[in-house]
Image: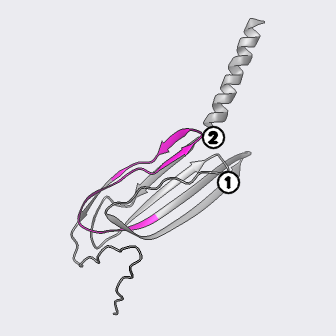
């Protein structure tokens, strides 16, 4: 009888472990280049994958030393063998504000009292050929240029 109870309890723990593990979240970040000049842009992508229906929004890095030129978000939800899989993808096109070495810190998300984070990146920016525009100031309109 004790053996049956022991097997039963072990089975419950295994079921709880797999139920919890299947709800895990993953964060994967990537950049298309780690070396560029001030005339170029870098693309930062973050993929958030989860088996949960409602995924909390990740805390994005600050992108210090870069100006966000464009950003996009897409989402995909699939069902395979009665299992839900949600994927959120965030993409940013970044322009360097000046030459130098910059670090893009990890994106982070907290779900079910567990903290997840993506990779960090070191990016080296060298001077380019074109003069840089001054960094944008919030609320201030940039001068118009004509060609």
Q: Which quadrant of the structure image shows residue 68?
A: bottom left
Q: Nearer the viewer, mark 1 or mark 2?
A: 2
Q: Using the image, determine if residue 6 lies above or below residue 145.
A: above
Please provide percent x and percent y for residue 6: 71, 12
Residue 35 on the magenta span: no
Residue 105 on the magenta span: yes
146 lies left or right of 60? left
Residue closer to the observer: 41 or 138? 138
At 48% from the left and 63% from the top, the residue drawn is 91
Magenta-highlighted residues: 92-121
At 34% from the left and 89% from the top, the residue drawn is 145
Residue, disc 1: 78
- Magenta stretch secondary structure, dominant: strand
Query: Looking at the rendering, in which quadrant would you find the C terminus?
Result: bottom left
Residue closer to the observer: 19 or 138? 138
Work out which residue is located at the far front of the displayed protein and give it: 139
Q: Could you classify mark 2 by the number of other residues whose Cα lies within 10 Å: few (under 14), some (14-19), or many (20 or more)?
A: some
Q: Which quadrant of the structure image shows residue 35?
A: bottom left
At 65% from the left and 47% from the top, the residue drawn is 52
Work out which residue is located at the far right of the displayed protein and give it: 1
The disc placed on residue 130 is: none
The disc placed on residue 23 is: 2
Q: Which quadrant of the structure image shows residue 1?
A: top right
Q: Secondary structure at mark 1?
A: strand
């Amino acid at each position: 009888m004790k053996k049956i109870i022991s097997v039963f309890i072990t089975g419950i723990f295994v079921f709880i472990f797999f139920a919890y593990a299947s709800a895990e979240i993953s964060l994967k970040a990537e950049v298309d280049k780690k070396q560029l000049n001030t005339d170029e842009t870098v693309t930062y992508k973050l993929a958030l994958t989860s088996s949960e229906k409602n995924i909390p929004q990740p805390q994005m890095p600050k992108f210090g030393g870069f100006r966000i030129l464009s950003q996009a978000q897409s989402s995909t939800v699939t069902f395979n063998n009665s299992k839900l899989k949600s994927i959120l993808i965030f993409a940013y096109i970044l322009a360097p504000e000046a030459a130098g070495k910059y670090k893009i810190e990890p994106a982070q998300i907290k779900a079910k009292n567990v903290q997840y984070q993506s990779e960090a990146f070191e990016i080296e920016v060298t001077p380019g050929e074109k003069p840089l525009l001054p960094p944008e100031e919030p609320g201030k309109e940039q001068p118009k240029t004509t060609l």
